[in-house]
Amino acid sequence: MARPKMTIHLPHFLRRAWQLLEARRALLEGAPERALEHLSDPALALSPQADQLRLRAVDVLCRSAARRASQGRDASVVRLLGVVALEDPVRADEWARRLDRPAASATARSAGSDPSDPSDPSGSAGPSQSPLGSLLAEMRDGTGAEEGRPRPPSTPPSTAGPRPEPVVEAAGPPAEGRPIRFHLIVDDGGEFLAVMGTSIVLGHARAGRADIPLLADLESRHARILWAESFHSGPSWKIEPLERGTVSISGREIAGAPVVLQHGDEVRLSPNLAFRFLLPEAASSSALLELTGGAESEGAARILLFSPGPAGRVRIGPNRRRHVPVAGLEHEVELSIARGYVKITCEGGVRVPCLGDDGVRAEIEKEVPCPPSRRVDVTVNARPSQRPPFGLTIAPLDPSPTGEVES
């Protein structure tokens, strides 16, 4: 006679704590949809911590949708924004409008109409309506995201940590003269496009010719940021326009020779694209670009420009004068790139299970191939011992076999 299955009912406070823990773990592993499954538990309905994690998960999904849009993968964009619509219909509608604008403009041009004319509907409806336009219509009717909210798991899975991944190899050096690029995701610090090179091109995303691709009114190669080091003036970042591109700094248009960028400069490339140039640390020549107006590149609103050499270190710490300020850290984390590796240093210890660690041993310094061939999740003992470990992720720009949001 078969024994009846036993259902374990956790106390309410334990259930909340477990679901929050699993949601955080899913976000660190780059699985926002799985995080939302855990956060949909009714036990978290009034939890402010759950609300914060939901915002983070939605943010990751929106940025993934932007990355898919830049690759022309409209079906995947529709699916991701459909998931976002379950949590935040207003934001999903906002992103669908933003990402659909190039398609709508192209439709209007092909019909011989003016896409800027609000009385002309050819850019947003009709037989040639794009998948994103269809999603907009569905969300207005309240029919977007056909599937309902995923159910949370009924019982906790094994508490064992994630299985060690295969050893990560370098993805191979970039093309001759092209910068190194990868994604950097920092727990409680957000997502960054990390770039290291001495000549970095900004341009329109769909042209495929830019190191920092952007969805805006830009030329395919609109401007170039240059890094140089002088014996007299030290290291500096400069910017110059390319082809027919225009560049203005603090309202003054530049032309001719490259102009040195100063900390706090407001740089505008087009009416709908601008960024702030920041040099947060006097001891580091690496820079930070903060895109304004909701703009993103490769799904990130912030771009870390690593400069070559020892002076290019990027630090993560509680001090506001850091490239990535994160409150509550006991030990700072330092990143530097050299010889095809990104070196991660922390006095509290660094663990990278997929590089052969046993998942327990921590060392002060670890190196990860750069750019990596696949996603690498790093655990850093940067927080006080009584708090959960601090995590960061280094990932290739192209979709990886694990951890990426796919269609």
Image: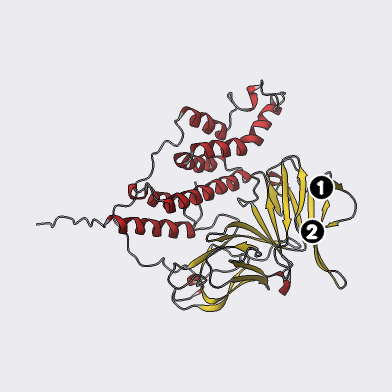
Q: Where does residue 381 sit, x and y in percent of width and height?
A: 50, 72
Look at 83% across and 50% down and name the residue there. Answer: 241
Between label 2 and label 1, give the one nearer the viewer: 2
What's the amino acid at mark 2? Gln
Residue placed furthest toward the right: 256
Question: Label 1 amino acid?
Answer: Val
Q: Is residue 327 visible?
A: yes
Identify which residue is drawn at 66% across, 64% down: 321
Is there a contact, CB below 8 Å, between mark 2 and mark 1?
Answer: no
Q: Residue 397 occupies which quadrant of the picture? A: bottom right
- Vertical comparison of 5 with 274: above or below: below
* Image quadrant containing the N terminus: bottom left
**Residue at mark 2:** 262
Residue at image position (49%, 56%) is 30
Against 312, residue 156 (above or below) is above
Question: Which residue matches tag 1?
Answer: 247
Name the secondary structure under disc 1. Answer: strand
Tell me the distance, in whole angstroms, between the alpha carbons under discs 2 and 1. Answer: 15 Å
In the image, residue 275 sits, relative to residue 77, either above or below, namely below
Comes first in the chain, label 2 or label 1: 1
Residue 135: x, y in percent? 52, 33
Instruction: Please identify the quarter of the rendering in which residue 306 is found.
Output: bottom right
Task: Give the residue furthest to the left.
Answer: 1
Query: Which one is nearer the viewer's eye here, 113 or 251?
Result: 251
Tag 2 secondary structure: loop
Say above or below: 168 vs 294: below
Q: Residue at x 62, y 46 (%)?
A: 71
**Measured from the top left, where is residue 386 in percent x and y?**
42, 71
In this view, the residue in front, 248 or 374, is: 248
* Label 2: how many Cα within 10 Å (few below 14, some 14–19, many 20+): some
Provide residue 230's location: percent of width, then percent of height. 85, 70
